[in-house]
Each structure stands twice: as structure tokens, then as C-alpha cells.
């Protein structure tokens, strides 16, 4: 239960401790991150963990969202989502009339590209408004006292290793913004059969329109951008070694292709008549994924 009084105390603590660092000098800009996206419940956490086990750095552990309450049934081992980037994406969407779970939204994200949000506005949202209980108020203040959306490069430089990885399904919806700020970054979009995704979302979260699957992938498919790659979760289960070899080739980083997956493929328990356009997107994803069955 969110306690507004306690949150106000922590907001006051942030005001007292706030000492922002300057953003990175472009001449020594942080290594371009590898972003992980895809519709939620598509296997993004599993793929992120595989990459972390092979030398990619998701940042300080106490800056990552931790599963608590019913969320433990969603991702028992963790979401591997960075708090600062998750909060920035949620405020970004709020300011621009967007949501990650609706089909009936304006598409202003096509033209709105700003990254910098006033630090006070950002802190108020994080501590007083959004109050995401998957990270402690103390950790929020520890992060926000120096960093916000205005100095993300400096944050990456000082808190990540040589191969930064940042997972957030929301980035799938406005990857153009991410590429504008980090033109040398890459985006790996994880996918699996839409029915499997919808079954998981509908049983563990809230019912969503099947067309949301199309929204999460169609624009990235149409972009035909070499910085974007699609990765099949089903093929990862079917051919772990080949899939990890494909990841290694695309990222340019040596990986342990003999890794054993602790997750096994599940069968579709519930099936429904999916829109043809959703199934078409899935077929296009399979044809364009880096680990497709050869």
C-alpha cells in the first residue's frame, strides 16, 4: 500500500540530497547500449538473463526492479529492468498520451523526440506519483540524487560495464527516440507465438486486445533498420546452440553457445481465433528473425 506521507518524506530527502552530475561529454560518450524489447510476456527477461550471463551488464543490482507480491509469479528471478529507464519511459508515455497496453492512443511518438525532462518533474513522478513499489524509496533517492533523464549518458558511463544492456518492453514503441539519442545502439526484439503471449498476459495480468501484438512489432518490421534484430523464443528452445551463435554474431560478442536453458517450451493451452493481421506479423517475425530455423 502506497503511503503518501512516507513518499513526501522521501521526496524531501531527495531535495536535500539532490546533486546532479553533468551529462557525458560527447567526446567520451558512453558505449551505445544494447536495448532489449518486445511485447511483455514474450521472453525478454529470459533473453536478457542469457546475455547477462555472457558478459553484458544490466547495471547495479539495486537499480533493477525486483519482483514482489503477485509479480513473483510473473518473473520469479527478476525483471532485469533498470529503474531509471523504466520510470523515464513511463513518464515519457504519460506526457505524450501513450500507454504500453492500449490500442486506442495517438501516435504522437512519431514526432516527439525529446529525452530531457526537468529533474524536479522527473523526481516528483518517480517518488510521489508513480510510486513503483518494486524498488525501495531509499534506492530511488540514491539514484535520483545524481541522475535523471537529463544525464542518462553519464549514468551509463558511471554505473554500467563495457557492454551495457537495458531491457524495457516500452522501447519497442518509440525506438526512433532511442536511436536518435544513441545512434550506434542496437535493439533486440524478442517474440513468440501471439497466442502464447496473450494466454500469459490474460491469465497473469489484464486482458488485452490481440492487436496489441501487432502494435508492438509492426513498425519495427517496417523500419527495415539494421540496428533492429528479431529473436524467436521458440527457436531458442528448439535450438539453443544455434540461437546463441546467432546472438553472438549479431552482437559481436563471444558467447557460451553450450548454455543450458532452465526454461522449457510450453504448449498452447488456450486457443482463440486471432486476427489474420496478427498472425501475419508473427509469420513476418519468423521470416526475419536472426535465429530462424534453416
Image (spheres, helix red, strand yellow):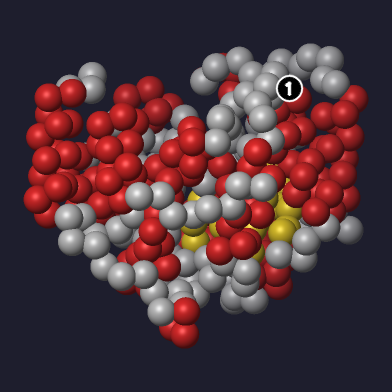
Q: Can residue 279 be seen in this view?
A: yes
Q: Residue at x 16, y 47 (%)?
A: 14
Q: Which residue is drawn at 55% across and 17% down?
A: 206
Give the percent coordinates (x, y) of residue 282: 82, 38
Q: Quick check: 283 left or right of 213?
A: right
Q: Residue at x 37, y 63 (%)?
A: 151
The answer to which of 10 and 233 lies nearer the viewer is 10
Give the percent coordinates (x, y) of residue 258: 61, 65
Give the percent coordinates (x, y) of residue 281: 84, 37
The answer to which of 262 and 96 lies nearer the viewer is 96
Quadrant holding the C terminus: bottom right
Q: In this view, does 126 lie above or below 201?
A: below
For mark 1, give the secondary structure. Answer: loop
Q: Quick check: 23 left or right of 102?
A: left
Q: Can residue 238 be seen in this view?
A: no
Q: Quick check: 61 left or right of 264?
A: left
Give the percent coordinates (x, y) of residue 157: 38, 72
The answer to which of 246 and 273 lies nearer the viewer is 273
Q: Residue at x 84, y 49 (%)?
A: 222
Q: In this view, does 246 lie above or below 282?
A: below
Q: How many labels does the image show?
A: 1
Q: Quick check: 46 left or right of 39?
A: left
Disc 1 packing (10 Å; few <14; some 14–19; many ≥20): some
The answer to which of 138 and 242 lies nearer the viewer is 138
Quadrant holding the N terminus: top left
Which residue bears the numbered disc 1? 210
Amino acid at each position: 500500500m502506497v503511503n503518501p506521507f512516507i513518499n513526501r518524506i522521501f521526496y524531501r530527502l531527495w531535495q536535500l540530497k539532490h546533486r546532479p552530475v553533468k551529462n557525458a561529454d560527447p567526446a567520451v560518450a558512453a558505449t551505445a547500449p544494447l536495448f532489449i524489447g518486445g511485447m511483455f510476456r514474450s521472453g525478454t527477461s529470459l533473453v536478457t538473463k542469457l546475455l547477462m550471463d555472457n558478459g553484458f551488464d544490466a547495471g547495479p543490482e539495486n537499480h533493477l526492479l525486483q519482483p514482489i507480491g503477485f509479480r513473483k509469479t510473473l518473473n520469479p528471478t527478476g525483471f532485469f529492468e533498470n529503474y531509471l529507464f523504466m520510470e523515464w519511459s513511463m513518464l515519457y508515455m504519460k506526457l505524450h498520451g501513450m500507454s504500453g497496453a492500449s490500442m486506442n492512443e495517438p501516435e504522437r511518438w512519431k514526432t516527439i523526440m525529446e529525452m530531457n525532462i526537468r529533474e524536479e518533474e522527473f523526481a516528483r513522478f518517480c517518488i510521489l506519483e508513480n510510486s513503483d513499489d518494486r524498488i525501495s524509496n531509499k534506492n530511488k533517492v540514491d539514484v535520483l540524487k545524481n541522475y535523471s533523464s537529463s544525464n542518462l549518458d553519464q549514468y551509463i558511463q558511471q554505473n554500467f560495464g563495457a557492454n551495457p544492456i537495458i531491457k524495457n518492453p516500452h522501447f519497442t514503441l518509440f525506438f526512433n527516440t532511442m536511436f536518435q539519442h544513441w545512434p550506434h545502439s542496437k535493439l533486440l526484439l524478442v517474440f513468440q507465438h501471439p497466442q502464447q503471449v496473450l494466454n500469459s498476459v490474460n491469465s497473469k495480468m489484464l486482458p488485452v486486445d490481440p492487436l496489441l501484438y501487432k502494435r508492438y512489432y509492426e513498425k519495427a518490421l517496417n523500419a527495415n533498420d539494421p540496428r533492429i534484430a528479431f529473436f524467436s523464443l521458440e527457436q531458442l528452445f528448439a535450438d539453443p546452440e544455434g540461437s546463441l551463435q546467432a546472438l553472438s554474431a549479431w552482437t559481436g560478442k563471444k558467447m557460451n553457445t553450450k548454455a543450458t536453458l532452465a526454461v522449457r517450451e510450453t504448449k498452447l493451452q488456450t486457443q482463440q481465433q486471432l486476427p489474420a493481421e496478427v498472425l501475419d506479423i508473427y509469420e513476418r517475425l519468423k521470416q526475419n528473425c536472426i535465429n530462424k530455423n534453416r
